[in-house]
Each structure stands twice: as C-alpha cells, then as structure tokens.
Image (cartoon, coloured by chain):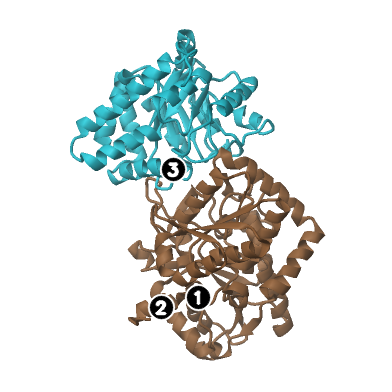
Chain colours: A cyan, B brown
C-alpha cells in the first residue's frame, strides 16, 4: 500500500527537522458555512494536519468546551453525512494536507461502518481517531479501516503501562496520539517533564510519529511539546476562540474565522521556531 | 443484526453469558476510552477473583442479611388479585430493603469489591436518586469519600433523595449538560473516572456500561430472583407462570429474571417507560422504539436519531429516564426469551393509586410501570396461574411528583 497523506506529511516534517501542528475543530462549529471557511484557511495559517471532530450528542471524553462545540454544530444542523461532503469540498482544493476525523463510534455505527469507510475514503479522509473503540473492539472498525487504506490512530495515555502498550500499538498506524493528562479535553495542562518521559517511553516501543495533545493551549506550551514530540495537537483553545466570538459578535462570521486563523498562526509560528531556539529557557 | 433465532439456534442455556469479551450476542462489549481500559481490565480480574472466593460470597451474604435486611418477602397481593380477577399476583418486596429499593444489593457487592481493590474514592451516577442514596449509604458505612453525579432536572424532581445523600456525607454534583438527567450524569461520572482513574471506583447502578459491569451488577442483583424462586416453590409448590419487572437500565428486572431464564415454562415481560406514549416520541422505550447503538461503553438498543445522535428520553419516573438498556436484556429480546411491553406515565400513575389503596403500599413510580402491565395481563389469566412482579422500590421519594400530577401542593 502506498504511503498515506499522514505518513508523507510526517516524513516531510522529519526532513524539515521540525514538529508539526495538528489543529482540532468540531465539524460544523459554529455552523457548517463558517466551519467550511475555517477549514479552507487552516493550511495557510500554518496547520500541518487537520483533525475534525465528528459531532456527537454525548462526547464522554470531552470537557465542557468541546461538548459545547459539538452541541453548537448539531444545533446548526450538522450531520456526519454533511461533514463528509465538506471534506470532499476541501479535498478538491487541497490534495496534500492530511485530514483526520475524530469522534465517537455511535454516529458511524448508525451510518453503517462499511458505508462510512467507503464514503470517508472517497471524500479524502486519511485517518480516524475513535475515542470509544479500544483495541478490544478492533474488529468493529479498526481492521476494516486499515484494509481500506485509512490510518487508525490510537490514543495512549498516562495509564497505558508497558504491559498494555503493545495492545495499543498493535493496529495503530499513521501516528500515535499521546494524551498528556489523565482527564478530559481542555482540562489541566500537562507537565513537560512527565510528557517527555512518556514520549521517550513510547519511542522505545514504536517507530510511529508521536503527537501529544489534551490541555495544550498557548504558543509557549505548543513549543514545549514541539521540542519533545513529532506534533502538538491544539483543540480546546481553538474551540474556545469560536465560543467567545459566538457569544460576543453573533453575526460577524468573517471576524470569527479570522480570529481562529490568527490563533493558529500564533501556534504554528511557535511550533516552527521551537527547535531553533530550544536552548532558550522559559518555554 | 440478530432478530429472533430459530429454535435450533437457541442456546442450551440463557444463563452462561457474556462471552470473554463481554458480549451478549451482538450486544455488550467494552466501548470505552483507552484511559479507562486498564481499570476495566483490573476490575474484571478483581471481580473474577472475588466471585471464585467463598469468603467474598460469605461476606456478601452476611451484609445482605444484617444490613440490607434480606431476604425480602414474597407477598401475595390478595386484594389486588381479587380486584383484577385473574392470576394470583405476588410482589417481591425489594422496596423493604434498607434505603428503600433494590439498588442497595448491588452497592453492597461493589463496595466490598472496591475495598478489596484498595480504592479510596467512590463515584456514581443517579437518576431517581435511589442508586445515589444506596451508594452514599455504603460509602458512609465503609468510610470512603463519595461523589454522586445527578442531572439538574432530576435534582429538582427528587429533592428528598438529594437531601438524604447529603445527610449521608456524599457530595452531590449537579450535571448541567445535555438533558440534565441520568444519561448526562453517567457521561459526567465517566469523565470523572477518566480524570481520577487510579484511586477511584465507579459504582455503576444498572446492568449497563462496559463489561464487566452488566454481568457483575446482574450477579449482585440476582439475589432477588434466587430468593423469589425458592419462596414461590415453598408457597405454591411450583414456579410462576409470569415474571414482570420495569426496565430503565434494567437491573431490578435482570435480578429477578436471571435465575428463571432456563425455566421454559416461566414467561418473562420487561416493561419500558412509554412516557407520553411511544407514538409521541416522548418516551424511554429503547427496546420498543430504538435501534442498536453504542453508548456508555456498551452496544445495546438505544434511542437515537438517523444520524446516531442520542434522543433525550422522557418518563415521569426518573429511574427509567434513560435512552439505553442493559445489553443482556437486548440480547434476550433478540433471541425471544423475554417479551417487551410498555406503560405510559398515565398508566403508571393509575397503578400507583391502585396499589396504594388496595394493598397499603406506596410503590415507587418505576415498579408502577410493571404493575400497569400486571393489571393488563392478570385478568386474562386463570386464577390458578401465578405472576411475580418486582416491587423494586418504595414511593416515598415520588410523592411530590404524584402530588404535582394530582394538582396538589405539598
């Protein structure tokens, strides 16, 4: 099987000698039109990989910020089918930026797993992160997805010990997503030393690129992660940006879209510079 | 998806599930975040070890007897039987347990396990508040910190139980997300567990959630059916013709049903909450009107829209106000071993009035749904036939809800 966009992107980043920035936005947040515009500008703003949440009414591993993003999208009429249409539109203009869909299993289960994999692949989706499908349930979606040529990205957490790690890594492809805290998205920020140890531990068990997420909010924190991991994932901070704009300036979606892209530019600049000024203290 | 199986495909026993992956047919499983997997596996190992340990069973029996007040009586509801003019109706009186419902059976079992595992902190979700009260009770008795998640809407309609939990030393955390009822309380408890996974034991209150919970809670609740089976044989010299119980998540029902599953002559009916009526869409009847889906760590029948979003359930009974159902019930429905019926809010309230006036028992609104089904079935049965209904909770907690529907201000 030829390398996926995700595998090619991480290979390119390695050649450039820098970490990547993965941005997370809930699909359809704050509404499908504004979301499409946010999506279209993420690459120019400096995102290296794009992670999109598939909206779900009951996102059990997410904190209040991303829960609210899910509900805004659903209230604006977002569906899984519509998200795939939007990815198709994005992919017509951007052939290289990897798109990863993240979410919970039930909407896919309802859509039909096989039909979903066909449609997602056709739309130009490159990988899946399904929070509530651990390796014990690999037959549900993971194995069929791999067969289809999609990457199936797994979360490793601080509770994933050496005994558990082989099971987690077994069918993981594309990259491994290290959840830097035991907790939900948007919670406390990670402690850099502990994350460094965990990333080193993961690297002893896998050749896969390691992305780190959960609790990374500022350019400084993203840079800190960029020095030790292959990519930093930022989600809640961007979703918060949307939430605050929705609350304060209801009608002006151009301003909201611009604010999200500005936030991404700040994060991307910090991630790109991280290893150049890594001698500097205080990051 | 399996529907009713051909007779030759039926299992030899309905009591051997789940398989090693926690599956009951197509239902069940372990659909949880990776953060929780090590804990789920640890819990499974600890439970398997406890189950095989005669000392654990002896300890559980002792707590059932001296703290819960078991065995609960099997009571012939003679005036109700006369009123309905058909089958003899027995109540399994689990409303007489300490804390007023069947929920304590499971809580005693799980807290003994938590203690064995060295956990220091207990969390639970609650709908009607009965499971919250039972959890707060055992946490107080065993001296463990206790946090109860409860939907804001349930807090409003179950004030007495909220106060009880606080008196017992538990912290009741209001859940403001989603429909602000049981499913959201369970989401929030899972979020807590993901965050505090190392020292925290999550006491799930129903035969729901990821494996091993559905099997473990069933095992602890099966004392109901085990007692009822022995009691009816002593009183009537034979097994009943019909078992009837209400299902939300399904723990009281599974507790009664499981010891009878292989008795082919015993009919079994699970009664779901129809709220304003299944046709209105405002109900909590997952097996009647839902489709298989994945929520709260399990695959089972689930109330959801065409996009797989969870539909907010509705029932007058907070304990039945849940969009899913335990996976073993879904499987038993698929293989045709249980029948599924529904009762509306109005039918439950009518049953409440009948039971109060004829038997001198104020039943909880949850078993009133089962009683509504009994009032439909018993008249069509012969007077030598026997129904056992699980009267799984007492109605003191519901008098405010009932008063409101009667237009009475308390």
Please tell me which of labels 2 and 1 falls first in the chain.
1
- In the drawing, what numbered circle is on residue B49? none
The residue that label 3 is drawn on is: A63
Rounded to the nearest angstrom, the CA distance separating label 3 from label 1 is 35 Å
Quick check: marks 3 and 1 in contact, CB under 8 Å?
no
Give left or right: position of B355 versus A81.
Answer: right
- Observer able to see residue B106: no
Do discs 2 and 1 belong to a common subunit?
A: yes
**Residue B133: x, y in percent?**
55, 67
Q: Chain of mark 3?
A: A
Q: Which SS class for mark 3? A: loop
Q: Residue at x 65, y 20 (%)?
A: A204
**Foreground residue among B323 and B109:** B109
Image quadrant where residue A245 sits: top left
**Where does residue A119 sit, x and y in percent of width and height?**
39, 31
| Whether residue A29 is situated above or below residue B27 in the rendered picture | above
Q: Chain of mark 2?
A: B
Which residue is at 55% across, 61% downward? B170
Which residue in the structure is indicated by mark 2? B402
At x 74%, y 82%, the residue is: B234
């Amino acid at each position: 099987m030829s390398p996926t966009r995700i595998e090619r992107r991480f290979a390119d980043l390695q050649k450039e000698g820098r970490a990547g920035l993965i941005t997370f936005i809930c699909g359809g947040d704050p509404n499908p039109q504004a979301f499409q515009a946010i999506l279209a500008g993420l690459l120019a703003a400096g995102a290296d990989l794009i992670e999109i949440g598939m909206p779900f009414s009951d996102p059990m591993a997410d904190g209040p910020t991303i829960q609210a993003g899910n509900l805004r999208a659903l209230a604006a009429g977002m569906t899984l089918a519509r998200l795939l249409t939007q990815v198709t539109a994005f992919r017509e203009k951007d052939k290289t930026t990897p798109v990863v869909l993240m979410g919970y299993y039930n909407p896919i289960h309802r859509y039909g797993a096989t039909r979903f994999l066909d449609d997602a692949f056709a739309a130009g989706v490159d990988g899946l992160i399904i929070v509530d499908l651990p390796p014990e349930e690999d037959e549900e979606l993971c194995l069929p997805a791999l067969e289809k040529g999609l990457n199936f990205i797994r979360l490793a957490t601080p509770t994933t010990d050496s005994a558990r790690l082989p099971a987690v890594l077994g069918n993981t492809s594309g990259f491994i997503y290290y959840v830097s805290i035991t907790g939900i998205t948007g919670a406390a920020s990670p402690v850099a030393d502990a994350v460094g140890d965990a990333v080193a531990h993961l690297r002893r068990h896998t050749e896969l690129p390691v992305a780190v997420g959960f609790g990374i909010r500022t350019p400084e924190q993203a840079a800190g992660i960029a020095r030790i991991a292959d990519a930093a994932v930022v989600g809640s901070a961007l979703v918060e940006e949307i939430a605050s704009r929705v609350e304060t300036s209801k009608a002006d979606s151009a301003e909201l879209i611009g604010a999200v892209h500005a936030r991404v530019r700040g994060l991307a600049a910090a991630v790109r510079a991280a290893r150049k000024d890594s001698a500097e203290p205080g990051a | 998806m399996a529907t009713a199986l051909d007779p030759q495909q039926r299992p030899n026993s309905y009591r051997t599930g789940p398989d090693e992956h926690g599956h009951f047919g197509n239902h069940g499983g372990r659909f949880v975040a990776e953060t929780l997997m090590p804990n789920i596996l640890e819990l499974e190992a600890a439970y398997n070890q406890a189950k095989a340990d005669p000392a654990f069973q002896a300890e559980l029996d002792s707590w059932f007897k001296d703290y819960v007040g078991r065995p609960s009586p099997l009571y012939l509801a003679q005036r109700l039987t006369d009123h309905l003019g058909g089958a003899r109706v027995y109540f399994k009186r689990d409303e007489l347990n300490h804390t007023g419902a069947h929920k304590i059976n499971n809580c005693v079992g799980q807290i003994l396990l938590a203690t064995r595992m060295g956990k220091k902190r207990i969390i639970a979700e609650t709908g009607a508040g009965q499971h919250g009260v039972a959890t707060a009770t055992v946490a107080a008795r065993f001296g463990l910190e206790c946090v109860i998640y409860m939907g804001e809407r349930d807090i409003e309609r179950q004030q007495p139980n909220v106060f009880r939990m606080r008196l017992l030393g538990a912290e009741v955390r209001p859940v403001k997300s989603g429909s602000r009822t049981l499913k959201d309380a369970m989401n929030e408890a899972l979020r807590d567990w993901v965050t505090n996974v190392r020292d925290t034991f999550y006491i799930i209150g129903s035969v729901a959630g990821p494996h091993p919970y559905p099997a473990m809670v069933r095992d602890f609740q099966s004392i109901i059916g085990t007692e009822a089976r022995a009691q009816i044989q002593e009183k009537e010299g034979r097994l009943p013709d019909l078992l009837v119980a209400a299902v939300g998540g399904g723990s009281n029902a599974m507790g009664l049903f499981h010891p009878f599953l292989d008795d082919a002559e015993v009919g079994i009916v699970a009664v779901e909450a129809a709220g304003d009526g299944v046709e209105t869409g405002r109900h909590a009847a997952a097996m009647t009107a839902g489709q298989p889906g994945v929520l709260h760590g399990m695959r089972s029948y689930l109330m959801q829209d065409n996009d797989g979003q969870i539909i907010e359930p509705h029932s007058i009974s907070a304990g039945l106000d849940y969009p899913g159902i335990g996976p073993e019930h879904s499987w038993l429905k698929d293989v045709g071993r249980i029948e599924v019926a529904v009762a509306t809010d109005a039918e439950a309230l009518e049953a409440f009035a009948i039971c109060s006036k004829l038997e001198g028992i104020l039943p909880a609104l949850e078993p009133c749904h089962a009683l509504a089904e009994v009032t439909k079935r018993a008249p069509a049965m012969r007077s030598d036939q026997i129904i056992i209904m699980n009267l799984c909770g007492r109605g003191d907690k519901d008098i405010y809800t009932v008063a409101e529907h009667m237009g009475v201000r308390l």
